[in-house]
Image (spheres, helix red, strand yellow):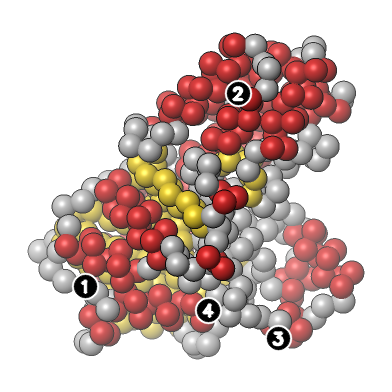
Amino acid sequence: MSAKWTFMVYVAGYNNLTSFAGKDIAEMRKVGSGEELKVTVFVKRLEQQAAHRMVISKDGKNELRENLGGDVDSGSPQTMVDFIRWSKAKAPAERYALIIWNHGSGWDPLDFDELYSSVKSAGVSARELDARGSSQIGRSLFKPTVEAALTQPNARLRAIASDDGTGHSLDTIELGNVLKQAHEVLGRPVDLLGMDACLMSCLEVAYQSEKDVRAVVSSEELEPGDGWPYEKILADLRSNPTLDGAGLGRVVVKRYVESYKHSEDMWPVTMCAIHSAGIEPFATAVDAFTMALRRVIKDDDVDATRLLRAHTRSTRFDGELIDLRTFCEQVRAQPFESAVKTAAKKVLDALKPGGDFVVANANLGESVEHCGGVTAYLPAPTDEISPYYKDLRFAQRHGWDEFLRSYRRAVRGT
């Protein structure tokens, strides 16, 4: 007999978040699996000799547990696909959530040689880096081990699901391929893709898998190391098993932000859930907005300066990920012609929670109080545009990459 939901959690904990992995699995065991809700977990942790797949039970009693050995690579796409296939076989359901638990860095597969240069210049060894680990570390930009950086200086720093033992992780394109395979394995789109990781609420990430996922929930900002409150999320789902993916995403947003309401030392905190069906119409609205901007900055240094001013006054994460709501608001605050302001307003309207695109959005902290839940890649016009950006589906199908180049030319004159 199938459950209403299977909640699949892929815990890539073979890194400096390993201590939080055990805590979160303990939270899941407080609810466990039942007739209508099954909870499955893949976990690989530093302190364990082997990776495991489990169907989580209440208090861990009589838990179905499979030992996968110590050589499993949690950063491999195949490992994640195998876990999804295993979950369907051991815990079939009408709906499926896939939660990826790890570090995150948004869409951007930054070059390893940035890390390589910083490691070499600082003279930091792998042993020293491990010794500098702290329980206070957040789920910040994914960094592989120093050993990997020193031995693979030309490799790519990936976006999510890192394994420090192998130096591997999943970038945005690979994650999209995994979700396509998940669609095939499950016979339906994943009902909710959740990323318990930092900086993953990017338009580029969501767009990569729009046909294979029904809803997405993730954070614009860095996440505190404690991550999601799994006990409360699962208890809500157990009490309301008829929720669809968007409804479960709304629960995650509510419970996540509530869990940090009285922990101001961990602010800022952000979380947003979106409908995948709304991604394409939203991207089209963004296209109209950037086309209007490209037209006015093409031959007008004054408008280029206005755009630069709007950019610098907008909320940014990790330097190059710009919150689209504050960006559009700042553009509307500049004396651009009406066509630009009208196009910006349409993007803002599409970002309103409860609409066809944004299911729910919530923030804590003054620096993020006006954020709309979704970012896009916008480096400073004085910086180089990532050579990898053109590989993303969003860049190939929409005009944001042309906007990046036009903006850079308008400000730099090149």
**Disc 1 marks which residue?**
33
Can you say whether 133 is above or below 73 in the image?
below
Q: Earlier in the sequence, mark 1 or mark 2?
A: 1
Q: Earlier in the sequence, mark 3 or mark 1?
A: 1
Can you say whether 268 is above or below 273 in the image?
below
Q: CA distance from mark 1 to mark 2?
A: 49 Å
Q: Are marks 3 and 1 in contact (CB under 8 Å)?
A: no
Q: Residue sitting at 33 percent across and 51 percent down?
A: 249
Q: CA distance from mark 2 to mark 4?
A: 44 Å
Crowd class of label 2 (few under 14; some 14 to 19; many from 20; radius 10 Å): some
**Disc 2 marks which residue?**
332
Q: Earlier in the sequence, mark 1 or mark 4?
A: 4
Can you say whether 127 is above or below 314 in the image?
below
Question: Which amino acid lies under the numbered mark 4 shown in the image of this protein?
Answer: Thr
Q: Earlier in the sequence, mark 2 or mark 4?
A: 4
The answer to which image quadrant residue 274 occupies is top left
Front-lying residue, 342 or 79: 342
Q: CA distance from mark 3 to mark 2?
A: 48 Å
Q: From the viewer's perspective, is the residue at label 2 or at label 4 nearer?
A: 2
Crowd class of label 4 (few under 14; some 14 to 19; many from 20; radius 10 Å): many
Image location (x, y in percent) of residue 247? 27, 48
Q: Quadrant of the C terminus?
A: top right
Q: Residue sitting at 87 percent across and 76 percent down?
A: 123
Image location (x, y in percent) of residue 225? 53, 71
Q: Residue sitting at 23 percent across and 62 percent down?
A: 236
Q: Are marks 4 and 3 in contact (CB under 8 Å)?
A: no
Q: CA distance from mark 4 to mark 3?
A: 14 Å
Question: Which amino acid lies under the numbered mark 3 shown in the image of this protein?
Answer: Ala
Q: Are marks 2 and 4 in contact (CB under 8 Å)?
A: no
| Residue at the left extreme of this rendering | 1
Question: Which amino acid lies under the numbered mark 2 shown in the image of this protein?
Answer: Arg
**Disc 3 marks which residue?**
131
